[in-house]
């Protein structure tokens, strides 16, 4: 059993988890959860969805840990899973059709169990409303590029798209966002 | 001298900068996350998924499948020999048809 402390490298904790030591995975979760929550919160609509995304990320990481090749840091690997999970959520949401109005939800007896993530500024609310109207690919790329300040190469690594593809999508996303923001004025 | 024209995306860039500076506070959601996660992992490990149930059941049914195949093979062999016997008897009843049938 590995004594999981802050000085133990991630790779050693991965080995310990694979050997059946769940406390090592707890340590990995503690180390990386803030980063994962930070990214996922850019895509989640409320605290419940945020929890779901993050749990799915770590559940997948746990069950697919054998697939982690040690050629890149563990953090990159789990960020790649996070990116894919966020993208899946955006696609699911898009497939689910138009969002239901709050009034309709309350009329149907819905009671919110988790508080919505607050938008602290009216301009940010406008931006979030516009981002919500982008396609999942556009939203993913613009969020990673502009809000998370990832480089094109990093986004290519996280999404599995080519760098050219990332640039083209970012350009289109920006143009679409500009148009949406102008419409809102 | 002309004043520099503002960049067409200046407004958008300002909004992005604002969004970057207002990272959502996730500390409440992060609280005891690892406890909830480990509970979910344990629950998932204790609940067999559909594919593992199918794998277990199919292995247990292998002797039954083997017996079925054996019975079918025996039945097919017997019915084939019955057919050969019936053709032989028919040829005795009608020797002309048997002659033309064989040629």
Image: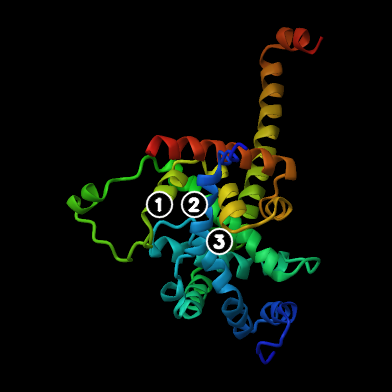
Q: Counting residues from the N terminus, which is met first, the one under dot 3 or under dot 2?
A: 2
Q: Looking at the rendering, which quadrant does residue A79 occupy?
A: bottom right
Numbered mark located on residue B57 in the image? 3
Residue under label 2: B15
Neighbours of disc 1 within 10 Å: few (<14), some (14-19), many (20+) = few
Residue B58 at least partly seen:
no
Chain letter for the residue marked with disc 1 in the picture = A
**Which residue does the numbered mark 1 point to in the structure image?**
A123
Whether pointer 3 and pointer 1 mark residues with C-beta atoms closer than 8 Å, the reply is no
A33 lies left or right of A112: right
The C terminus of chain B lies in quadrant: top right
Instruction: Give percent across and percent down for residue A86.
Output: 53, 55
| Disc 3 secondary structure class | helix
C-alpha span from label 3 to label 2: 58 Å
Please provide percent x and percent y for residue A80: 65, 59
- Comparing labels 3 and 1, the label whose residue is closer to the camera: 1
Report the side of A98 relative to A29 (left or right). left
> Which residue shows up at 71% across the image and 56% down it?
A154
Which label was assigned to residue A51? none
Q: Is residue B46 above or below residue B77?
A: below
Q: Chain for mark 3?
A: B
Q: Mark 2 lies on which chain?
A: B
- Spatial CA distance of label 3 from label 1 is 58 Å
Between A185 and A88, the residue placed more toward the observer is A185
Label 2 with label 1: CB-CB less than 8 Å: yes
């Amino acid at each position: 059993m590995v004594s999981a402390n802050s000085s133990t490298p991630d790779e050693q904790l991965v080995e310990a988890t694979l050997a059946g030591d769940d406390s090592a995975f707890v340590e990995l979760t503690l180390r990386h959860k803030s980063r994962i929550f930070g990214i996922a919160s850019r895509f989640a609509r409320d605290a419940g969805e945020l929890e779901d995304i993050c749990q799915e990320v770590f559940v997948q990481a746990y069950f697919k840990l054998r697939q982690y090749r040690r050629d890149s840091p563990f953090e990159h690997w789990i960020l790649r899973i996070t990116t894919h999970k966020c993208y899946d959520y955006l696609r699911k949401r898009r497939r689910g059709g138009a969002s239901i109005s709050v009034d309709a939800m309350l009329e149907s007896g819905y009671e919110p169990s988790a508080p919505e993530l607050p938008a602290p500024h009216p301009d940010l609310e406008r931006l979030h409303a516009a981002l919500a109207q982008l396609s999942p690919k556009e939203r993913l790329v613009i969020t990673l590029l502009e809000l998370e300040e990832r480089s094109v190469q990093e986004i290519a690594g996280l999404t599995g798209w080519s760098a050219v593809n990332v640039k083209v999508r970012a350009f289109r996303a920006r143009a679409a966002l500009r148009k949406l923001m102008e419409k809102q004025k | 001298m002309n004043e520099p024209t503002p960049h067409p995306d200046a407004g958008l860039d300002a909004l992005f900068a604002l969004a970057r500076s207002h990272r959502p506070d996730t500390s409440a959601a992060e609280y005891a996350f690892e406890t909830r996660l480990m509970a979910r992992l344990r629950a998932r490990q204790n609940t067999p998924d559909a594919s593992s149930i199918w794998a277990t059941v199919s292995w247990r049914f292998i002797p039954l499948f083997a017996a079925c195949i054996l019975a079918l093979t025996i039945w097919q062999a017997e019915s084939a020999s019955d057919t050969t016997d019936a053709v032989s008897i028919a040829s005795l009843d009608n020797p002309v048809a048997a002659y033309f049938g064989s040629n």
